Image: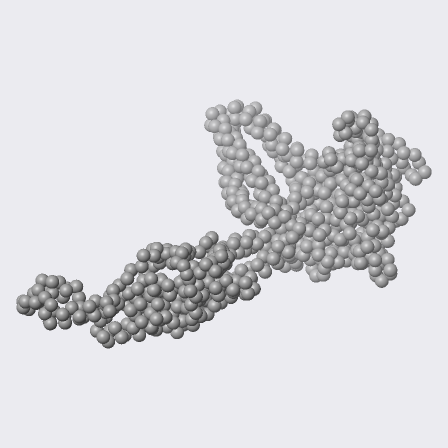
């Protein structure tokens, strides 16, 4: 078998179409938390990825719509995390040779994250408080240990 | 002297009122009324009647009578007072002004106000016009310079000795001493002396003339300095008076000046802290989002680390060689050592297999390497990020606590300042600071002018002697010198008489006030009226006593009563808001002191006191202090159906006051 590095032709990542309609609400909530007019697609995608990965669940995201964050907007740190997620998911570092596979995995976890956040927006009376507490506690747990 | 009857017609809110005091003893009269019912108008009417001082035009002719009259109608405003004089005669004083209603509904005067005075020798006699000019008659019994001691404003009384009082007391003392003529003589003869000296100098040669010119120059300089000195003194007094007023106004709002300043600072601080909180909160939330998100993904790092460790173990991180370089050697068919590499040979095939394996390993290793380096950075950021979150969180907690504390303080101040014009209070506080600076500068100028004046006086003295020496030997000049000397002597004598008389009046007043003060204050207390007409209350060791607000008001009452005694004019004392705006405690204390004094002063004489009291002052509790004097009680209240337009006078206590708890208790005889 000859393995070679396969570069993706994609320009952007994709959302799960089922929960995509909830994105504007999520964006509003995040803007409210940050006291900003808007939040970036990168911030939303990475948050969804984090929530989904932390939950350990992936959802299929067919087809590739390229309607999420543009790949050129992802910084080196974001790409490193996405690759780290792919290795963790496949337990195989050869996954690094297949960019499409890496992005697929990230999109699948992000789809779960978006689904969970969509449900939380409906179920949590104080969604912003709930989300802040979740992120704060996570940052505390990791930041104070590492 | 006692007022027996007051009739007020069409004056301000008082359309038609008669206060008849002939039935009771009338020595102590309470004219009560809530704010706006006409108490101040009542006093204003008497001020106009006795002194011709008109109120503002909108408070002169009754608006009620104006509105209810036809266009062109002639309307009379009049105030008349019947007075039982000290010699048992009766005087009837009336002042009247005619107005006409214009087509536009306003009023215009018709002619000048008219004062008429009639007297009768006994109760059975008839009133006849006084023989002298009525204005002269009234000035004799109600001297204009003593107006402040006839019609008092109690609200200003607690600051009576600080505000406007110096001039009033100086006027009063001069009025009593009756020495205006001597002051005038002294001034006129000084001018005569100057004129004579000029003639002498012309007669006695150049040297004397020059000395006299210099002397006149110095005198003019002295006059200029003196004039400047007086102006400075007046300005200083005005500033001091204004400061006292400002201080009184600020005191009247119980230190709200400082509180309003504090409120301003708090509001600015709150704004700053609220802005800081917003900025800090945004920074906090952004870091929570970034660190929180990355922390959620941190579990993925372990597998990456494992792969990195494995790659290192396999010696492919970094790759042991560069596959592309070896591939180039195969294509060139030459080994590094120079040996020929035969294509498709065993060695070449083996090398190609190794190159293929390490090409993958190299690509993976390169990506692993850059990825793991980024992850290292992210892990550092997670630690510093958490530290940042903690710092911002602590800052937010502190800012919220500060804002909470400031908000509570602000709310409390706002509550205290409610109903007050905070901007005005701030302006007053600023004005007070400015006045302090101005007063300091004026005091400095005042001292400097005093010193300059003293120096010039010494020069004038010296020139006087030189002039006398230089002008010797001329017979006509010697004669003129005698005249000038005489003029100087008379001027000096008149000046002395003036100052002695004033000193005597001052002394009499001091004695009388000191005596009366014992009625309200224990201990060896005396009063001093110094050359600047400042009335000071001193202990036996000469140190000044700091009086409370109530005691200061009493001092004003005592001064006023002592003045009547010294001047031997028993005109009534009419006070608007006699207990001022004192708090409950000082008000009770003042009422008690006042009743002690009045019991002594009015019960054994024909003196009369009329108090115009508002509902906050005249309560069953203050009333009982004066019960022994058997006061006459009347009240001013809106005529039903004419609220704010027309007041009427009723006897006793205003029935509307029974809605107040204390008066209700009094009506039910719970308060005796």
> Horizontal and vertical percent for residue B226?
56, 37
Q: Residue at x 7, y 67 (%)?
A: B342
> Horizontal and vertical percent for residue B581?
71, 52
Q: Residue at x 29, y 60 (%)?
A: A7
Q: Is residue B159 above or below residue A79?
A: above
Q: Is residue B225 above or below residue B329?
A: above
> Horizontal and vertical percent for residue B579?
74, 52
Left/right placement of residue B3 relative to residue B488 reads right
Which residue sits furthest front? B344
Q: Residue at x 55, y 37 (%)?
A: B228
> Horizontal and vertical percent for residue B455?
50, 40
The C terminus of chain B lies in which quarter of the figure? bottom right
Left/right placement of residue A95 relative to residue B628 reads left
The N terminus of chain B lies in which quarter of the figure? top right
The number of callouts visible is: 0
Which residue sits furthest right? B124
Q: Does residue B511 appear anywhere in the picture?
A: no
Q: Residue at x 71, y 48 (%)?
A: B155
**Is B149 or B658 nearer to us in this picture?**
B658
**Is A34 or B273 nearer to us in this picture?**
A34
State the colouring used for the structure image: one colour
**Is B268 or B422 nearer to us in this picture?**
B268
Q: Does residue A72 appear anywhere in the picture?
A: yes
Q: Is residue A14 above or below residue B502?
A: below
Q: Is residue B386 above or below residue B36?
A: below
Left/right placement of residue A112 relative to residue B591 reads left
């Amino acid at each position: 078998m000859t393995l070679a590095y396969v570069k993706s032709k994609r320009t952007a990542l994709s959302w799960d179409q089922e929960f995509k309609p909830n994105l504007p609400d999520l964006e509003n909530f995040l803007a409210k938390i940050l006291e900003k007019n808007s939040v970036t697609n990168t911030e939303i995608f990475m948050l969804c990825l984090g929530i989904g990965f932390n939950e350990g669940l992936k959802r299929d995201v067919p087809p590739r719509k390229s309607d999420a964050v543009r790949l050129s907007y992802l910084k080196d740190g974001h790409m490193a995390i996405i690759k780290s997620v792919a290795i963790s998911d496949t337990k195989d570092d050869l996954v690094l040779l297949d960019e499409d596979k890496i992005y697929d995995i990230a999109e699948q976890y992000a789809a779960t994250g978006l689904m969970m956040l969509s449900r939380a927006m409906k179920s949590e009376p104080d969604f912003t408080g709930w989300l802040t507490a979740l992120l704060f506690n996570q940052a505390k747990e990791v930041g104070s240990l590492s | 002297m006692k007022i027996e009857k007051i009739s007020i017609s069409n004056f301000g809110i008082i359309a038609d009122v008669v206060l008849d005091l002939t039935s009771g003893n009338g020595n102590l009269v309470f004219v009560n009324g809530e704010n706006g019912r006409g108490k101040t108008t009542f006093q204003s009417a008497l001020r106009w009647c006795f002194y011709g001082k008109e109120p503002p035009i909108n408070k002169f002719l009754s608006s009620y009578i104006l509105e209810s009259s036809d266009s062109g109608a002639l309307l009379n405003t009049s105030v008349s007072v019947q007075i039982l004089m000290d010699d048992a005669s009766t005087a009837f004083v009336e002042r009247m002004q005619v107005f006409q209603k214009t087509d536009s509904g306003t009023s215009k005067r018709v002619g000048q106000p008219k004062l008429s005075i009639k007297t009768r020798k006994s109760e059975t006699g008839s009133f006849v016009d006084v023989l002298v000019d009525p204005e002269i008659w009234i000035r004799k019994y109600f001297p204009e310079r003593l107006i402040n001691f006839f019609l008092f404003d109690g609200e200003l009384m607690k600051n009576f000795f600080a505000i406007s009082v110096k001039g009033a007391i100086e006027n009063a003392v001069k009025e009593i001493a009756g020495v205006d003529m001597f002051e005038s003589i002294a001034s006129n003869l000084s001018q005569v002396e100057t004129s004579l000296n000029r003639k002498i100098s012309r007669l006695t040669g150049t040297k004397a003339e020059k000395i006299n010119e210099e002397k006149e120059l110095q005198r003019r300089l002295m006059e200029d300095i003196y004039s400047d000195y007086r102006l400075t003194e007046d300005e200083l007094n005005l500033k001091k008076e204004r400061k006292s007023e400002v201080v009184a106004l600020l005191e009247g709002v119980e230190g709200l000046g400082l509180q309003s300043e504090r409120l301003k600072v708090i509001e600015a601080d709150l704004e700053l802290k609220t802005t800081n909180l917003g900025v800090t909160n945004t920074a906090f939330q952004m870091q929570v989002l970034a660190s929180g998100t990355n922390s959620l993904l941190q579990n993925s790092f372990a597998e990456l680390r494992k792969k990195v460790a494995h790659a290192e173990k396999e010696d492919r991180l970094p790759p042991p060689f560069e596959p592309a370089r070896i591939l180039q050697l195969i294509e060139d068919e030459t080994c590094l050592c120079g040996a020929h590499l035969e294509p498709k040979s065993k060695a070449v095939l083996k090398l190609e297999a190794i190159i293929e394996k390490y090409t993958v390993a190299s690509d993976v290793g390169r990506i692993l390497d850059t990825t793991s380096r980024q992850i290292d950075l992210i892990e550092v950021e997670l630690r510093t990020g958490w530290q940042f979150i903690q710092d911002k969180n602590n800052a937010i907690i502190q800012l919220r606590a500060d804002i909470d504390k400031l908000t509570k303080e602000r709310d409390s101040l706002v509550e205290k300042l409610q109903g007050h014009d905070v901007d005005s209070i701030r302006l007053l506080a600023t004005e007070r600071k400015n006045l302090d600076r101005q007063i300091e500068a004026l005091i400095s100028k005042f001292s400097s002018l005093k010193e300059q004046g003293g120096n010039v006086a010494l020069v004038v003295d010296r020139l006087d002697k030189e002039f006398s020496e230089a002008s010797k030997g001329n017979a006509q000049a010697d004669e003129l010198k005698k005249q000038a000397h005489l003029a100087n002597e008379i001027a000096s004598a008149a000046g002395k008489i003036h100052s002695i008389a004033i000193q005597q009046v001052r002394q009499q007043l001091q004695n009388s006030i000191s005596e009366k003060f014992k009625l309200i204050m224990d201990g060896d207390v005396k009063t001093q009226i110094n050359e600047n007409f400042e009335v000071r209350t001193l202990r036996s060791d000469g140190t000044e006593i700091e009086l409370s607000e109530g005691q200061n008001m009493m001092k004003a009452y005592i001064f006023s009563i002592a003045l009547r005694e010294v001047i031997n004019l028993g005109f009534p004392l009419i006070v608007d808001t006699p207990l001022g705006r004192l708090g409950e405690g000082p008000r009770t204390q003042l009422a008690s002191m006042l009743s002690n004094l009045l019991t002594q002063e009015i019960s054994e004489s024909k003196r009369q006191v009329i108090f115009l009291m508002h509902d906050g002052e005249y309560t069953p509790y203050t009333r009982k202090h004066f019960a022994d004097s058997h006061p006459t009680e009347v009240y001013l209240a809106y005529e039903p159906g004419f609220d704010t337009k027309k007041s009427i006078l009723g006897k006793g206590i205003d029935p509307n006051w029974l809605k107040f708890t204390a008066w209700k208790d009094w009506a039910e005889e719970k308060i005796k």
